[in-house]
Image (cartoon, rainbow, N blue to C red):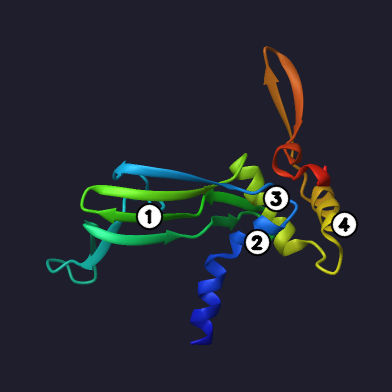
Amino acid sequence: MKNKIKYFFKKFIFLKALSSPFKPFKLKWYIGRIAIGTPYFYPRIWKENKDKPGYLIAIPKKIGFDFVELGWKTKWTSTDYRFEWSPLISFVFFKWQIAVVFSAPEASNYWESWLYYEFNTDKSKSQKERIIQCQQEFTQNWISYKDGKKESINYYKFILKEKYL
């Protein structure tokens, strides 16, 4: 039972971003025909295939609820965070869907930086000190080219609250 409770709260860990130096994410609502994946496919149920034992078949959900936690992984090292999808809540009723997506500014830069801040900065320090550590160790400086001109962009200016810049 204790593990189930831990897992339940782990799914909602992304909510800690609201009390962090990062700008609050917004809620994007969608109401209409099924169009939002949970995360890769439209909402579905997996059932045993009676013709092929050991295989599963996907059946579109008629009525159902899904909660999709923040999708991320590490790539080359334990701190090389890669954003995959935003958290969302989806309710399906026949061919209709109501979905709420937790949408962050510059989603990839936001969630990857927040994950580093949450898991890899010194929690004995203040938020200001932790975000300085995060910016030094997990830079978000990117180079882009527009009309042949090189431009350097620090994405922390788009994802942090004003007082932490």
Q: Earlier in the sequence, mark 4 or mark 2?
A: 2
Q: Residue at x 59, y 45 (%)?
A: 104
From the viewer's side, name the closer residue of 46 and 162: 162
Residue 147: tell me if it is visible. yes
Asked if disc 4 and disc 3 are in contact, CB closer than 8 Å, the reply is no
* Residue position marked by numbered label 3 in the rendering: 113
Quickly name the residue at label 1: 90
Residue at screen point 50% across, 54% down: 87
Tell me which numbered mark, 1 or 4, is placed earlier along the sequence.
1
Task: Identify which amino acid the numbered label 3 is placed on.
Answer: Ser
Name the residue tied to disc 4.
Answer: 129
Provide the secondary structure element on which disc 1 rests. Answer: strand
Q: Position of residue 4 (x, y in %)?
A: 49, 80
Task: Using a 10 Å C-alpha cutoff, classify the residue at mark 2 as few (fewer than 14 neighbours), some (14 to 19) or many (20 or more).
Answer: few
Q: Amino acid at mark 4?
A: Glu
Q: Nearer the viewer, mark 3 or mark 1?
A: 1
Q: Residue furthest bottom?
A: 1
Snapshot quadrant of residue 142: top right
Front position among marks 3 and 2:
2
Element at label 2: helix
For marks 1 and 4, give the CA distance. Answer: 37 Å
Label 4 vs label 3, nearer the camera: 4
